[in-house]
């Protein structure tokens, strides 16, 4: 029976790999690598660095072109299910063609495989079809939620309070439900722009754990325009962006407010050090963004 390791690799910093992930990567014969094209080539390169550092000398990489998803379909759930099914077939064929019947394959997953990632569902689909029997192991990783909280140096919740993790598509529902803290992922349209006038604070981060990590924190009403502008510049510069943010109505119960003035400043290189490079200051907050570097991830 083939073995499949689903390995969470964190948000971009190779030092975020857990010891369990490193050990799993060392057992893998073949890595199945989804290739989303040249706009995310640096993400492929980063995974290649991890494999060179922790993989076996004879480790093979099998690129799998990512099937296109219909992002214009009015049936969101249906479009995603169709996309997942085409991924099931692509992964299944790669396992048959490139992994020995008793071999071990690996899939490297950004963040944590259990949080807003489809890999486990794809693998479940392969197992349900029954054509390729698999022994599957999931190795957790540091998620965007954890990385965001660490980068800003905050606790996600107040004492005894809940946290809602949702998508931009369902942000309005979470806010209307009265959640004291909402962490938003997969929000390409910055739906938080519709939440001004509610006295909310935002803690935003892009490229978390990466040398390009960029953070903005402050009252949503005062910093949202800056976030929109910075986000657009970063996307134009790098061709893609991964960002996450937290919204809360106030400093959580039991916490001590951080920063001075209307906003707090935080930034880093993805390895815990603070490195100021370019400072963009508004009346509400300061943004410190690490500069682009040749060969950066």
Image: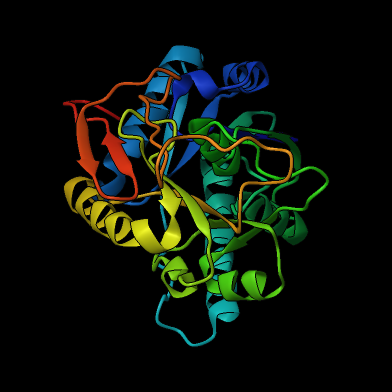
Q: Is residue 245 left or right of residue 123?
A: left
Q: Is residue 106 visible?
A: no
What residue is rendered at 53% in x and 70% in y? Answer: 198
Q: Is residue 129 visible?
A: yes
* Front in this rendered view, residue 19 or 198: 198
Quarter of the image that includes the N terminus: top right
Q: Given the current orientation, which residue lies at the most extreme front position?
A: 261
**Total number of numbered labels?**
0
Choose between 259 and 211: the one closer to the eye. Answer: 259
- The residue at 32%/55% (across/down) is 227
Up-down relation of residue 47 to residue 53 (above or below): below
Q: Residue at x 43, y 37 (%)?
A: 208
Q: Quadrant of the C terminus?
A: top left
Question: Closer to the camera, 122 or 175?
Answer: 175
To which quarter of the image does residue 275 belong?
A: top left
Residue 15 in percent (x, y) is at: 49, 18
Front residue (pair 224, 142):
224
């Amino acid at each position: 029976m083939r073995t499949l390791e689903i390995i969470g690799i964190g948000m971009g910093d190779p030092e975020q790999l857990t010891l369990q992930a490193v050990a799993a990567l060392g057992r893998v014969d073949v890595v199945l690598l989804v290739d989303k094209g040249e706009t995310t080539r640096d993400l492929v390169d980063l995974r290649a660095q991890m494999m060179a550092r922790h993989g076996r000398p004879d480790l093979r990489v099998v690129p799998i072109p990512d099937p296109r998803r219909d992002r214009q379909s009015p049936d969101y759930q249906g479009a995603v299910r169709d996309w997942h099914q085409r991924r099931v077939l692509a992964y299944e064929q790669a396992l048959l063609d490139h992994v020995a019947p008793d071999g071990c394959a690996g899939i490297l997953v950004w963040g944590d495989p259990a949080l807003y990632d489809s890999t486990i569902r794809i693998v479940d689909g392969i197992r349900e079809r029954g054509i390729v029997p698999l022994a599957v192991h999931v190795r957790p990783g540091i998620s965007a939620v954890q990385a965001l909280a660490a980068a800003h140096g905050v606790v996600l919740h107040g004492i005894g309070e809940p946290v809602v993790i949702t998508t931009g598509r369902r942000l309005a529902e979470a806010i209307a439900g009265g959640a004291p803290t909402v962490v938003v992922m997969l929000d390409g349209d910055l739906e938080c722009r519709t939440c001004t006038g509610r006295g909310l604070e935002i803690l935003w981060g892009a490229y978390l754990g990466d040398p390009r990590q960029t953070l903005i924190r402050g009252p949503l009403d005062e910093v949202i325009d800056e976030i929109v502008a910075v986000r657009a510049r970063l996307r134009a510069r790098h061709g893609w962006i991964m960002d996450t943010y937290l919204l809360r109505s106030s400093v959580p119960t039991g916490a001590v407010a951080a920063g001075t003035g209307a906003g707090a400043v935080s930034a880093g290189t993805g390895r815990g050090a603070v490195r100021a490079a370019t400072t963009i200051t508004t009346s509400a907050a300061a943004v410190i963004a690490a500069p682009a570097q040749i060969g950066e991830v």
